[in-house]
């Protein structure tokens, strides 16, 4: 199945930057690109108020023009890229979560139209990052240039989601022709953790090198009281940060762990949340 790269587009500057990142990802993967606009408010605003009129509103002409213009600009920049545009009668978050069931990758901007300036990641991005059925790329920072140089960082903690993140991170570093850096944050108060952490990093690095011959893999052990803050600081020199959806010790009922939530909210580079691919409906 030729799963597409899907990106949510609403005409806001962050979403247009996300569309550019999605186009590059589609080219790297030799996949089609789908530009999707969910044109109802996340809470359902836009649905007819008349109780006897149960139909949904039709797609807007402004939405169509915005999508077609965006598609034309992307094809002009990446000739040969296959682009499909679609308006969907649904809240943008729910729409993209549903699209993720059949996608190779879903890309979201840090903040879309109507996002409050004080929110570092809008409700749509938060929803998709938590509930996606495939890897989700959150394009950060929202108001500055996207990094183009630096290593791909992967947060490693020995959990199954982190193991998945190592594989995704190795793929991304290979595509970008850059170094893969595996980072483990050890509790600075636990003096006995260092040897176990070094073994953990060595195992992850061996797996990445084994599956991606020729890839340069580095191991970085950081000691800090707060793993999320240490990873956020490390992201300042990275081109991409890859994290599992939930780390070791995360509660099973939480779809996005606290460290991953902090990264998608505050990282200084794009963040790839390593959800496994779901089965196509």
Image (cartoon, rainbow, N blue to C red):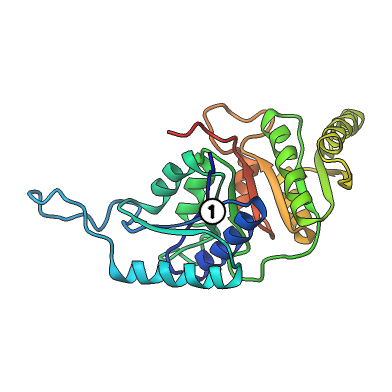
Q: Quadrant of the C terminus?
A: top left
Residue at the far front: name it.
Answer: 80
Please say if 28 is above or below 208: below
Q: Nearer the viewer, residue 237 or 9?
A: 9
Left or right of 161 on screen, residue 11: left
Against 246, residue 145 (above or below) is: below
Label 1: how many residues lie within 10 Å, few (<14), some (14-19) or many (20+)?
many
Between residues 177 and 252, which one lies in front from this camera angle? 177
x and y, in percent, of residue 199 in the image? 89, 29
Residue 78, horizontal then vertical, whole percent: 61, 67
Residue at mark 1: 32
Residue 207 appears in the rendering: yes
Q: Position of residue 222 (x, y in %)?
A: 85, 44
Left or right relative to 27: residue 73: left
Q: Which residue: 58% across, 58% down? A: 22
The residue at the far right in this view is 195
Looking at the image, which is closer to me, 231 or 4? 4
Q: Secondary structure at mark 1?
A: loop
- Residue name at image x 85 percent, y 34 percent: 210
Q: Is residue 159 left or right of residue 78?
A: right
The structure residue drawn at horizontal position 60% and vertical position 55%, both measured from the top left corner, is 26
Residue 226 visible in image: no
């Amino acid at each position: 199945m030729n799963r597409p790269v899907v990106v949510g587009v609403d005409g806001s500057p962050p979403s247009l930057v996300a569309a550019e990142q999605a186009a590059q990802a589609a080219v790297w993967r030799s996949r089609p690109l789908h530009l999707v606009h969910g044109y109802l408010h996340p809470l359902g605003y836009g649905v007819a108020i008349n109780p006897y009129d149960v139909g949904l509103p039709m797609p807007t002409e402004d939405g169509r023009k915005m999508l077609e213009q965006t598609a034309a600009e992307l094809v002009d920049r990446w000739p040969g890229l296959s682009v499909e545009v679609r308006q969907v009668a649904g809240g943008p978050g729910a729409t993209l979560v549903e699209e993720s069931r059949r996608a190779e990758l879903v890309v979201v901007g840090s903040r879309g139209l109507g996002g409050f300036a004080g929110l570092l990641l809008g409700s749509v991005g938060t929803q998709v990052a938590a509930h996606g059925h495939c890897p989700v790329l959150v394009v950060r920072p929202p108001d500055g240039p996207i990094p183009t140089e630096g290593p791909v960082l992967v947060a490693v903690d020995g959990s199954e989601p982190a193991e998945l993140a190592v594989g995704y991170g190795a793929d991304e570093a290979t595509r970008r022709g850059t170094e893969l850096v595996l980072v483990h944050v050890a509790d600075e108060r636990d003096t006995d953790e260092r040897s176990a952490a070094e073994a953990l990093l060595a195992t992850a690095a061996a797996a990445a090198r084994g599956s991606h011959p020729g890839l340069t893999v580095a191991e970085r052990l950081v000691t800090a009281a707060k793993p999320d803050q240490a990873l956020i600081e490390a992201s300042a020199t990275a081109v991409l940060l890859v994290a599992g959806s939930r780390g070791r010790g995360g509660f099973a009922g939480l779809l996005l762990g606290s460290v991953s939530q902090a990264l998608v909210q505050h990282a200084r580079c794009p963040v790839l949340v390593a959800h496994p691919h779901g089965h196509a409906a």
